[in-house]
Image (tube, rainbow, N blue to C red):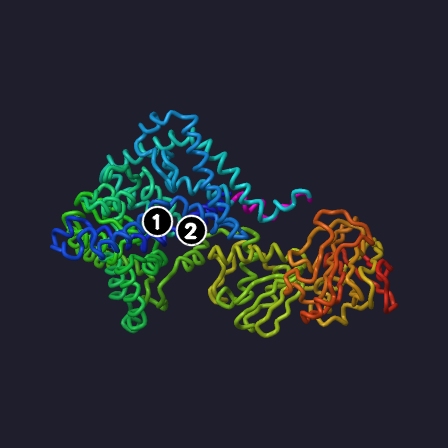
Amino acid sequence: MKGKIYAKAQQVGKTFMLPISLLPIAGLFLGLGASFTGPTFIKLYHLESILSPGMPLNRFLSILNDCGSVVFDNLGLLFAVSIALGMAKSEKGVAALSAVVGYFLMYASLTSSIKNLRNLNQLKQVNGLITNVLGFNNTMNLGVFGGIIIGLIVVWLHNKYYNIKLPDVISFFGGTHFPPIAAAVSGVILGILLSYIWPYFAAGISALGFFIAKSGVVGSFLYGLIYRMLIPFGLHHIFYLPFWQTAVGGTAVVAGHTVQGAQNIVFAQLAAGGKISYEAARFFSFQFPEMIFGLPAAALAMYSVARKDKRSEIKGLLVSSAVTSILTGITEPLEFTILFASPFLYFGVHCVLFAFSAVFVTLLKVGVGFTFSGGLIDFILYGVLPGNARTNWVPIIFLGIAYFVVYYFLFRFVITKFDLNTPGRKDDTTLKTKKDYVDNKKFTALTKDEQVAYEIVAALGGTDNLVNVDNCATRLRVTVKDGNLVDKETLTSTGAAGTVVNGASVQVIYGTTVGNIKTNVMDLINSGKAPKTVANSVKPANSSKLDSEDKKVQKSVETGPSQKIALFAPADGQLESLQTLNDGVFSKEMVGKGFAILPENDNIYAPVNGTITTIFPTKHAIGIKDENGIEYLLHMGLDTVELKGKGFKILCSEKEQVHQGDKLAEMHITEIKSAGKATDVIFVATLSDRLLDVKIADNDRVTANDQVAELLVKK
């Protein structure tokens, strides 16, 4: 349970990065627009001739200012869409649209509920609670929390109901039409509930923000420490976001408007041309001494203690990663290299220095913010250009120099004292990534389905070898870069009945469960847990691979009591054995035992009594389970999955009880042949330990509903 909660929290945190990735460009627009149109800036540098209000350049910069503001003002909506898009298992576009619908109806319901059910004047007493959002006047300020809440609700509804089947009379509203409807209803209900609940929650987070603001350097220390300690776990986005975007990070009145959230306060003050509040900026400015000075010094320390014969190999890596840290504040290569070498060096030294940086910028009253990370670009845009009088950026230079010295000598001492394996110290000359650390420490616990999916990806050569992953009714259809990297034996150990490799085309036969397997594989790849190459794959704990003795085929098995099941022709035409088919999977009975018919007309009938278990989305295959518990596959044509439903008409539905002889489908032979596909109708009992043998009749031409085969199975 803890592993699932942790994995879900990581997934939620990862979706935050999509709207956050917009902030640099939005902040650039806002920073340039606000900085160069501010009256103080224009007067200070005597730029009235080109930047006075009404001048073309001033108008252009004002447009940039407004365009940047609209992103920050509507982050709640962006977060709702991002969560739905990132966490939807399928039909991601539908999920994103549903999130928009849910978000708008949540605010419509909330606004109406306040107007009709609550005393608006009382609500206005809660600092910053009442605001205007997306045209909704005098509504509650939910901030990004509102977007996160509705996003999580919508994506849960979407994943549960995007393929729901409704009764025929209302079937139009089923499938992908249903999630936006469910989102609309949930938005209305959530808006009503929040009209009662949110004032108390808002008052609570406002009090928390007030407490942190009053806790001064202690609060700054804890914020910096926790922030950096969460980096390896991927949970730092969940931690810092409330400080950046809600009253947890403070509330201020800027240009007559109440603003909540440290980042919103900083940029509102930038836009207004006023002095930047260091109480809000302390959640950002502490990163500049680290990214621009401290971590590059750590890179220099690692270079200085490397073996002389290895320095040329690591020089380029360390220089490029240090420059990246300086310019953009992206530090993963350096930080995970530190963590990989020694958790103590990361948590006990680096994170503590980070926390003290937060203390120092608070004491020095530095007011420099950023949109994404504490690199030189943001430092110039939001620190230097607005002017030292507004941001007090100069102390960062002196603090940064001190941090450069401390990082260099402290890292050099710890690495040599404890003989840590940093790049070039021993045989390893590479920088590390988060995935290296996860794989090495078995940090992420894989579920059973993830373990199987992990082995499948590794057996296919890793994600770097994959071009496309798809499936038909029984097979995982994969396009790879190099077919020689495919490990058939490992694929067999994951439950595959067989694997066919033809150049770059790979077919892995799993039977009718292949849809779930493909979903698990794609989920693993999208989560970032799948191995990139065969070389960096690791065998997860509790691996599903079988021991060598278990892989041996048991030649002699006790058949025990058996029974015979009559199978009937699903179509008029020529009866064929599977071995005659131009398909290496069906002909070798990798899917199961049965027969085929080359049909003479379009009509397809049920060969047995049973229940429809599966109708493949492309309509070319139907799964049936008979009263004896035997599962069958009725497959119409060869490679007809590529037609995406064209040429087929399904006349039954999933979970429907059918009788032998009932008409199940129509396959339009002429249309299928014109598409260059074979029209053989295949009927097989899918592989199981109960399946013994099948006997096929001798006659060549058969009529639909003739008995054509007899299946022998264990009772």
Lateral position of residue 15 relative to residue 121, left or right:
right
Name the spot of residue 175 as percent of width and height, x first.
Answer: 61, 48
Q: Residue at x 32, y 55 (%)?
A: 25
The amino acid sitting under disc 2 is Lys
- Please tell me whether residue 216 is drawn above or below residue 177 in the rendered image: above
Q: Is residue 353 visible?
A: no
The residue that disc 1 covers is 71
Question: Which residue matches tag 2?
Answer: 14
Crowd around label 2: few <14 · some 14–19 · many ≥20 (10 Å): many
Q: Which range of residues does the magenta coloring cover?
A: 156-168
Give residue 421's mark.
Answer: none
Under circle 1, the secondary element is helix
Three-letter amino acid code of the residue under disc 1: Val
Give whichever of discs 1 and 2 has the lower sequence position: 2
Closest to the observer, 333 or 638: 638
Find residue 407 and report its image quarter: bottom left
Q: Is residue 164 magenta?
A: yes
Residue 370 painted magenta: no
Q: x, y percentage for residue 76?
A: 39, 44
